[in-house]
Amino acid sequence: MTTHHYFRCPGCGEETRKSRLFDAVKNVAEDNKPACRSCGASTDLHLSFDFALCVQDKDAKVLASFYPHQLEEWPCEGRTVTFYPFLIVTEREGRDRAVWLPYWHVVRDGGKDNPKYGQWAPFMDMELFEDLLSQARNDGFLNHEA
């Protein structure tokens, strides 16, 4: 599934695609969104998914993006691999909020980072995500004291 992305200015409506998807969601998480070239306002990241099975609402605005404070990293054949899981909160046009859970493996070879996009990233309505979290929390899996 291809995920298209662009930044849109909420003021003047100008759209631009300046970066790779990995960089775009990471920049949103780090509160480092690009400014509009026309008016200087902060832009919003928009996503468009190529969903199958007759899904109608394929466009979403990113409200927030998160990745872990402590990333997992390991050596692999002389390179270093860093795992970047994201939790992205979106709002679909004509619908409520939804959650997207993409991930990347960033392979560092020498001084160059090469992000590799994970193939299977769930996207679901917020109610479904909250239901799953509630079930796990009720069974004691998300309690930090455990």
Image (spheres, rainbow, N blue to C red):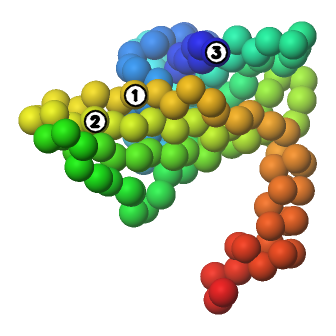
Of label 2 and label 3, which has the lower sequence position? 3
For the C terminus, give its image quadrant. Answer: bottom right
- When the figure is inspected, residue 140 is found, relative to residue 13, above or below; the finding is below
Residue 21 point in image, percent of width and height: 47, 24
Q: Which residue is mark 1?
A: 116
Q: Amino acid at mark 2?
A: Val
> Which SS class for mark 1?
strand
**Is residue 18 visible to us here?**
yes
Q: Residue at x 52, y 38 (%)?
A: 103
Label 3: few (<14), some (14–19) or many (≥20) C-alpha neighbours in 10 Å:
few
Residue 102 point in image, percent of width and height: 58, 36
Q: Amino acid at mark 3?
A: Met
> Which SS class for mark 2?
strand
Q: Which residue is mark 2?
A: 107
- When the figure is inspected, residue 31 is found, relative to residue 22, above or below; the finding is below
Looking at the picture, tell me which residue is in the foreground, 61 or 110: 110
Q: Which residue is mark 3?
A: 1
Q: Could you say which disc has been placed on residue 106 in the image? A: none
Residue 99 point in image, percent of width and height: 73, 41
Q: Amino acid at mark 1?
A: Lys
Residue 85 point in image, percent of width and height: 51, 46
Label 1: few (<14), some (14–19) or many (≥20) C-alpha neighbours in 10 Å:
some
